[in-house]
Image (cartoon, grey):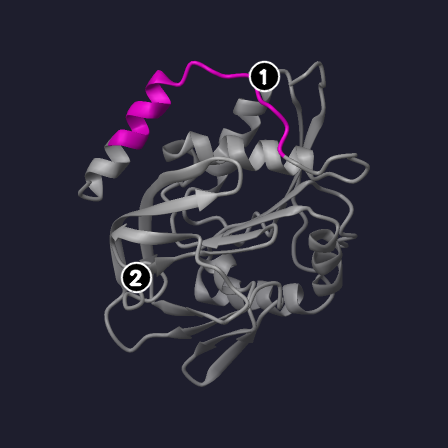
Amino acid sequence: MNGVSPTLRVCALYPDLMNIYADRGNLLMLERRCRWRGIAFELSGPGVGDELTGEEADLYYIGGGQDRDQALCAEDLAGPKRAPMHAAVDRGAIVLAVCGGYQLLGHEYQLGEQTLPGAGLIDIRTVRGDGKRLIGNVAIETDLPGVGPHTLAGFENHGGRTHLGPAATPLGRVLRGHGNNGVDGYEGVISGSVIGTYLHGPLLPKNTWFADWLIATALGSRPGSATPTPITLEPLDDQLEDLAHLDACKAAGL
């Protein structure tokens, strides 16, 4: 890390409501990979009604939740927390949202006669599909800044069909599985420092390269950084982690 010992500040929004897809595993993965490198780790977890400033973290995380809990969070995220979240993104903070959290980052989520408001951070709209839920192991090919082509593997289980607008870029191309809507061949979204995906199960323990990319990019983009680019992380012995990634890819049919 070029002699730098920073602190990764993570804000996990709605940890008591949006946490049904092994989301704590993602947070634990970030904490452990920081600790193993001597990087300090701070975690906050504001819920519905709690104050958010947009300055408290380098990385904001939102997991998945049930419809009722998702509706409660949607009103809060699109209401009092909307401006702080936009301020965080404007200063370069990373936002990672998985499944239900991903659906809340766009313009709206239509569930039949009910429409949940979105935070407006990305150009997407989600509609609850009339057909079967999109379920199964999934693998996608990504090309993130600074790391080039990589495979992300995980599990998807969603009734919503997400459609990207012209201002949104897919996180990756579907190799196996359904992706955003089961039709266009794309999965997730990346828009500036905002990333949304349906991959869970959990995501980061199956894809440690992605966890490291998030850590390095979040620390490099923090306020006051002269060069908001990913820092260099010390390599770790990832033999077991690499096997977990291979198993996830094989489960998806690669």
Segment colored magenta: 230-246
Task: Inspect the magenta stretch and tell me whether residue 235 lies in it.
Answer: yes
Query: Between 156 and 207, which is closer to the camera in this rendering?
Result: 207
Relative height, residue 211 to residue 71 (above, below): above
Residue at horizontal 50 percent and vertical 50 percent from the top? 63
Which residue type carries mark 2? Gly
Q: For the residue labelled by badge 1, is the local secondary structure a helix, a strand or a loop?
A: loop
The residue to which callout 1 is attached is 37
For disc 2, the marked residue is: 185
Query: Residue most toward the bottom?
Result: 113
Residue furthest to the right: 224
Q: Residue 17 lies in magenta, yes or no? A: no
Taking depth in this image into account, of 92 and 60 the one nearest to the observer is: 92
Which residue is drawn at the image coordinates 63% and 16% (left, top)? 38
Please state which amino acid type lies under the numbered disc 1: Arg
Identify the mark nearer the N-term, 1 or 2. 1
Image: 141 above or below 108: above
Q: Quadrant of the C terminus?
A: top left
